[in-house]
Image (cartoon, helix red, strand yellow):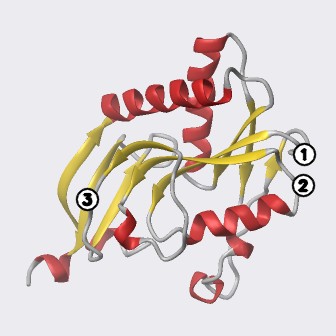
Amino acid sequence: MADEHNLIEKARIMDAARIDRALSRLASEIVEENQGVQDLYLVGIRRRGVPLAKRIAEKIKVLEGSLPYLGSLDITLYRDDLSTVGASPIVNRTELEIDIEDKNIVLVDDVLYTGRTIRAALDQLMDFGRPRKVRLAILIDRGREHRELPIQADFIGKTVPTKKSEIIKVMLKEFDDEEGVGIFERAEQHSS
């Protein structure tokens, strides 16, 4: 991501309460679509997709009385822009607690933009087996006009149409000092 110190927040589009409500709605929609938790497997995409998947899983437990399967993917080495990631990318572990074969997978990520992150996640997921179905749950969808691949979310917390110059930043207590979603621009673009 861009240099964090060079960003100016233009708008705060979600606070902690709105994130929580969006995740509650996503949990309810996922359970409804899956008709319960049978064979349901939430897989968070590192980094911010992982805590979002955990939070959705906890909300599903409240609704259904049991947790869905939970896993995480690190797609670093599957990215098609690996050359821009750096010479020695930091690779975290992919953790899938059980076999994904014939499971109903819901990939969870914070922001859907070009679709390339999701493509990389699908590539890696298929290396682990063949799920029955794969769905996508996203906290923020930046809109189809930015999509570079034919990928769309099945479950959306909030759709936020943005300009290409804008950056959506999801801040979660697990990684950041605050909880919220903001629209940012680089300082040099903001001043022009």
User: Marks 2 and 3: CB-CB under 8 Å?
Assistant: no
Indicate the secondary structure of the residue bearing disc 3: strand
Image location of residue 12, percent across then percent down: 21, 48
Rendered-image quadrant of the N terminus: bottom left
| Nearer-the-camera pick, 140 or 6 | 140
Earlier residue among tags 2 and 3: 2
Query: Label 2, on which residue?
Result: 129
Question: Which residue corresponds to mark 1?
Answer: 101
Q: Amino acid at mark 1?
A: Glu
> Which label number is shown at residue 183?
3
Place of residue 13 in the rendered image (x, y in percent of width and height, measured from the top left): 24, 46
Give the vertical position of 42 relative to 38 (above or below). below
> Can you give x and y, in whole percent of width and height, for residue 114 in the image?
47, 71
Q: Which mark is residue 185?
A: none
Mark in front: 2 vs 3: 2
Left or right, 185 with respect to 62, comes to left
